[in-house]
Image (cartoon, helix red, strand yellow):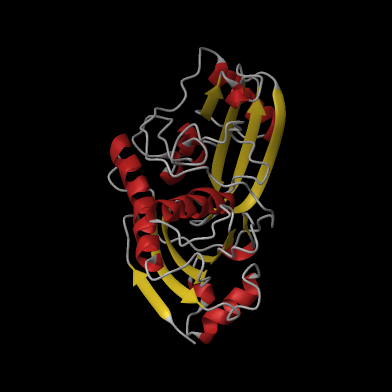
Amino acid sequence: MRETVRSVLLVFGITSSAAFVGSTNQVHPTPGRNQDLVAREPSKPVDGVADAVRDAYMREFGARIERPALHIDPSGGGCGAPYLTTTAYLRDSATSARVLHLFATPDGRTVIRKSRLSSVVVPAGTFRVLTVITRHPETVDDSTLGNWEAAQAKINRDHARFAAARGFPRPIISFENTSVLADVGEIANPRSPAAVAEAIERRGFVAASYRFVVSINLDPAQPQGGFAGAAGFVYMGNYGRWSRPLTAEQWLNVAGAVYHHEVGHHWGWPGSHDWAPTCNRRSVDPPFIVPATLFGWEDVDGDGVPEILDATPYGGSL
């Protein structure tokens, strides 16, 4: 058995997050390409919209959200009618939260659909990540770990640049990464959280000590997407149908699919992808998969603290 392990400390964040989250075991589309951060201000509602949304939160959930986080898309994401999306993270602990979500008409008066999620991972802090990349000679070569680590570093820079652009003193999110190469057959089933945990623990790792365990399986014989599984598991298959060793740019694409897409599901973004739907498969707030305000990363109540870190989020919500 060949063994290659690299541990890279890339800490830009604040508190460590560790909590259980139940996620759907579904295949999701992945971003078409890696995109650089584009500074973008949160949606600014017209007069009366915030009041209508505040009323909707009380009517639909019995929750008072004084200054709701809003994303309004007059284009309808290229899908049809304009829409408004709003979310509210209400912490149950330092690492776990409930998420309220409303999808409505742009004036906030008509709720089209809603959801309430519980026990989601709070999207804030420093997350320990163990990535296992299965060796396939056609797609994984000696450059893989270097390219993958560079791509992981780019994800941390995305969050650092976002925080700097907003004037926050430090990034809201960071990842502390350890990466392992595994031979084909070493993991009985790379899609199985239990099989991956068993394989890495034979190497001396403790799976439970990592908030996210990522299995990357770029098998050229099995084109597959990715999914977010239970207890912080992320699987990423050969969604690009690659048959040659991936370039540095392609590993950036994979990192975006893992960290900006699938990890987002653990933070509460639903498998239906309906927080900020688009039909051109391009995020409205690149490189993030949904507008940053919907993860609580914007300061919507004007107190200088992003809502996900605010002791009184959304202007003092109940």
Which residue does the image show at 63% across and 23% down from the upper left?
Answer: 55
Name the foreground residue: 300 vs 224. 224
Q: Quadrant of residue 142?
A: bottom left
27 vs 69, left or right, is right
Which residue does the image show at 68% across and 35% down from the upper left?
Answer: 61
Depicted 106 relative to depicted 196: above or below: above
Which residue does the image show at 48% across and 54% down from the upper left?
Answer: 254
Residue 277's x, y, as percent?
Answer: 61, 33
Which residue does the image show at 37% across and 29% down from the upper left?
Answer: 302
Depicted 316 relative to depicted 50: above or below: below
Q: Quadrant of residue 6?
A: bottom left
Whether residue 283 is visible to the viewer of this picture, yes or no, is: yes
Instruction: Locate the C terminus by quadrant.
Output: top right
Residue 152's x, y, as percent?
Answer: 39, 58
Whether residue 316 is visible to the viewer of this picture, yes or no, is: no
Name the foreground residue: 292 vs 108. 292
Residue 83's x, y, as percent?
Answer: 62, 23
Number of numbered discs:
0
Depicted 63 relative to depicted 260: above or below: above
Name the foreground residue: 315 vs 283. 283
Farthest residue toward the top?
Answer: 47
Depicted 200 relative to depicted 84: above or below: below
Residue 239's x, y, as percent?
Answer: 59, 53
Name the foreground residue: 154 vs 113. 154
230 vs 170, left or right, is right
41 vs 78, left or right, is left
